[in-house]
Image (cartoon, rainbow, N blue to C red):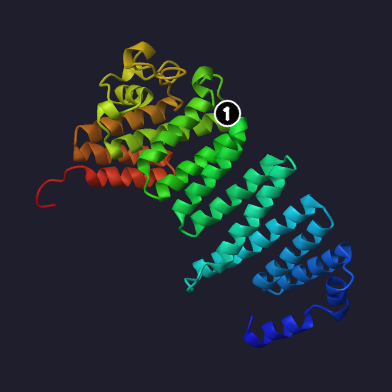
Amino acid sequence: MDISSIADSLLKFSVPERLRQRLTQRPAPAEASAELYALSRQLEADDLRVFAAACAEGVAACEGVAENPVAEAEALLRSARLHLQEEIETYRMCLPTLWDSLYYAIDAISKATDIFEQIGVTHLAVTALMELAKAMSTLARPHDAVQTYQKALDLNKAHNGTRERLVILRDLAEAHIQAGGLVEALTTYEEIVIVSGLLKLGPAKAIGWYRELARQCEIRQVLLLLIVEASPGRLSPYHAQMLAVYRSATFGSVSPTSTSATKKDDVGGAGPGSFVSFLPPMELLHLKDFVLAVTGKDLRRTIAASERLVEHLDATETAFLDYLVDLCPHPSGN
């Protein structure tokens, strides 16, 4: 939209005198809210998201006067989403920004979450914070995303082990990776497996989304353990068991239904149970072969193992795989 079109749209949808009188002399919150909402929708349709967001904030103010907290919070979230859309579009177009829209969005979501907490709908506050955190990750602000996910976890602390909490932890681990906090991501993946209760269920009873989540956590933990190269004394008992299994030279001990490196007492107390693999047999063998190749610093075997393993990995895991291949010692002169 060019400058003249923007000017025409703003003039066309300037606040009418009747609405101004209602707001300044004898307020009628319901009527003002309806008109501001219609104005916001029209401005959004005209691709004027910042102005539409301002009108949405006006709707929230009207609903606050009318003592309608749900509608007030929803209007604040609408304003925040419009500001985030504007900021994301600016970022994707590589245009300069002062992050004004992001800060407005943070303020609006903060107010909305406070309202949701006051009226006892914490899950909506958590959802709003997760939406903000995802936008921050898109805007390449992973450290801010991590802090926002942590706030969502604090609000969700009463729902430990639920699917909602596991989703927050999964996304938090992704944000840690984006921020370069590989050790923190490793710890978060371990927490997912432990608090989910999947270790108690075992592979036979873990199905659907939960089985896939456990599979992803296992692959990423193994690759991250190879990258961070933590000393044995700094490994958690669970990770010590995991590495013991994958570094074992015998393939017969890696059945996905009975994968346990050592008993709990042998490693000083591991938590709810021993390490159990949730990978299908072929993926398990390919990942184990890759671990043995990397551990042995065998470049040729590492490359061959990575080619077999890569078909089972997503983009993040493939990046880990490529990094480990690059770390493998290359013959001099190559």
- Looking at the image, the residue that sits furthest to the left is 332
Q: Which residue is drawn at 71% across and 46% down?
A: 116
Please state if 268 lies on the left or on the right of 154 as rendered: left
Pinpoint residue 58: horizontal percent, then vertical percent.
75, 66
The crowd level at tag 1 (other Cα within 10 Å; few <14, some 14-19, many 20+) is: some
Please state if 138 lies on the left or on the right of 77 as rendered: left
Q: Nearer the viewer, residue 213 or 100?
A: 100
Pinpoint residue 311: horizontal percent, then vertical percent.
41, 41
Q: Which of 289 and 232 is in front in this view?
A: 232
Q: Is mark 1 on a helix, strand or loop?
A: loop
Q: Which residue is drawn at 43% across and 21% down?
A: 276
In which quadrant will I find the N terminus?
A: bottom right
Pinpoint residue 324: horizontal percent, then vertical percent.
28, 43
Q: Which picture quadrant has residue 201?
A: top right
Pinpoint residue 67: horizontal percent, then vertical percent.
82, 53
- Give the residue at mark 1: 161
Q: Which picture quadrant has residue 217?
A: top left
Q: Residue at x 60, y 51 (%)?
A: 131
Q: Which of 27 and 128 is in front in this view?
A: 27
